[in-house]
Amino acid sequence: MFGVLGDNRQMKNSLDFCFALTFVLLLAQPAAAHPYLPLQSGNTTVLAYDFHVDTTKPAFKQSDSKGKMIIRTEGAEEKQGKRYTRFRTSYEGISFMAGSKDIHVWRREENGVVYLASPLQAVFNETVELPADVAVGSEWDYFDGEKSKRKVTAHLELQFEGKKFPDCIEVTRSILNNEKLKQAINKNYYCRDVGEVGSLFKQPSPVGEYITETKLFEFKPANSDTDARNANELGLRESSKNEAPRPFSPTAEGRQPQRVLE
C-alpha cells in the first residue's frame, strides 16, 4: 500500500512538473504576428506627440503641448487564463502628463484577430483592435469606455522625409453614444511589420478645433543595434496609471492623452 501511495505521489509530482514546464515553454514562445500589428517582444516605438487648439485666441493656445510617447513591447504575460503580450507606454515632455505613471495595455492574437485589453473601472476589458481581414470596408465593434465602431477606410502608402512605406492601413473610429464625441474625427494608422505609426484626433469647438496628432519618430525592432538601421530600412516618420488625468478621450487604445471638451 505504501508503495502504491509513493508511486502515486511520484506520478503527481511528475505531472505537476510537466504542467509547469509546458506553461513556461508556452510563455516563452513568440507571439503570433498580425501583419499590421506585430507582437514581437523587445520592439520600441517612439511617437512624436502634438496637441494644439486651432484658434487665433491666445488664451486657448496656452494649453498647446508637444512631446513623445515611448511604447515598449515587454513580453508575454498570462491574465485571466489567456496569454497576452504586455505593452508599456511612457511620456516625455507632454506638459499635462507630467508625473503620470506609465500605462500598461495587453494584446493577444487569436485566429488572426488582435485583441486589446486594459483595466477599465476595475474590470479587465478586452476589445478587438484589428480583425484578421483588413480589407477596405471591414468594420467591427470597439469598446474602451465608449461604444464605437472601427472601420478600415484606406490602404495607403505613407511617405516622410523621402522614405516610403507602401503597405499601411487607415482605421477610422466612430463614437456611437457620446454626443460630444460623435462629431470628432478619430483615425489610427498601422504599417506592415511595424504596427501603429500615427493617429489623428480632431474635435470641433466654439473656439476652434482641438487637434491631437501622433507620428512615428523612431522604430527600434527587437535586437536592433543602431538607429541608422531604423532610418535606412524602415524610413517612416509618419504616421495607465491606467487612466490618464482629465481632460481625456478614450481613443487610441487608452494610451494616448487627448484634451477634449468636457
Image (cartoon, helix red, strand yellow):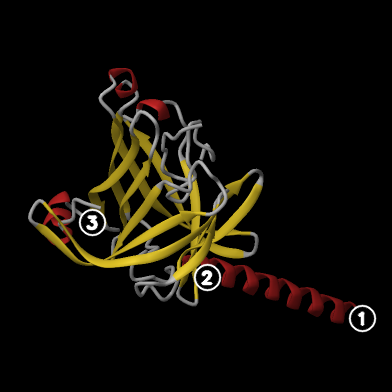
Q: Residue at x 42, y 68 (%)?
A: 30
| Disc 1: CA contacts within 10 A as few (<14), some (14-19) or many (>=20) | few
Residue behind mark 2: 26
Q: Give the residue displayed 33% in from the left and 48% down from the top.
A: 200
Q: Earlier in the sequence, mark 3 or mark 2?
A: 2
Identify residue for label 3.
224
Question: In the image, which disc is placed on residue 230?
Answer: none
Other-residue count near label 3 (Cα within 10 Å), few / some / many at <14 / 14–19 / ≥20? some
* Mark nearer the viewer, 1 or 3: 3
Residue at 50% over, 55% down = 106
Asked which secondary structure carries label 1, the reply is loop
At label 2, counting other C-alpha atoms closer than 10 Å, the crowd grade (few under 14, some 14-19, many 20 or more) is: few
Question: In the structure shown, which secondary structural element does the residue marked by tag 3 occupy?
Answer: loop
Please report whichever mark, 1 or 3, sits nearer to the chain's N-terminal start: 1
Q: Amino acid at mark 1?
A: Met
Amino acid of disc 3 = Ser
